[in-house]
Amino acid sequence: MRITKSSLVKIIKEEVARLVEARPEGDIPDMVGYYSGVYGEKNRRQQDPETALRDYEDWARDYMGAESGPSSSSVLATYIEQEQLSDDVWKPLALQLGLEPSRVSAYLS
């Protein structure tokens, strides 16, 4: 199949237009988000349970200044509010940590 120069120019313009639509306001295009439907590195990281757990544990150590930080319902609640996590993200995280989601939600405002 042969593609004419004008057809190639048209295809390129259409792809550029799609990339511009996939781009966050004032930012570079999110190619992974464009193809996966999950926009933003933060959102992709939260969807992976192991990565979400590791991110939380790192945050909790910095927040508490101690290794014991991640296993507290109130600390997890602070993280949930700060990161604005949805229920489908933080509840599995709480269970991974051995915390009861209802106890964590008691600390949420």
Image: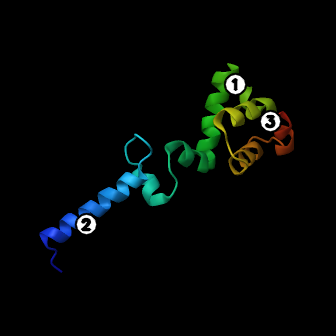
Which of the two discs, 3 and 1, labels the residue nearer the N terminus? Answer: 1
Q: Amino acid at mark 3?
A: Leu
Q: Nearer the viewer, residue 68 or 9?
A: 9
Residue 97 appears in the figure: yes
Q: Nearer the viewer, mark 3 or mark 2?
A: 2
Q: Which residue is tagged 2?
A: 11
Q: Nearer the viewer, residue 7 or 85?
A: 7
Q: Which residue is tagged 3?
A: 108
The image quadrant that residue 24 belongs to is: top left
Q: Amino acid at mark 2?
A: Ile
Q: Is residue 72 left or right of residue 19?
A: right
Q: Determine the CA span between mark 2 and mark 1.
A: 54 Å
Q: Residues within 10 Å of mark 1 (few under 14, many from 20)?
A: few
Q: Which mark is residue 30?
A: none
How are the colours assigned in the image? rainbow
* Above or below for 29 versus 8: above
Q: Amino acid at mark 1?
A: Glu
Q: Nearer the viewer, mark 3 or mark 1?
A: 3
Whole-percent x and y of residue 53?
A: 65, 41
Q: Secondary structure at mark 1?
A: loop
Whole-percent x and y of residue 49?
A: 63, 48
Whole-percent x and y of residue 67?
A: 69, 25
* Above or below for 1 versus 102: below
Which of the two discs, 2 and 1, labels the residue nearer the N terminus? Answer: 2
Q: Which residue is tagged 1?
A: 67
Residue in the image at 76% along x and 34% along y: 77
Q: Determine the CA span between mark 3 and mark 1.
A: 23 Å
Q: Nearer the viewer, mark 2 or mark 1?
A: 2
Residue in the image at 30% along x and 63% along y: 14
* Above or below for 34 versus 75: below
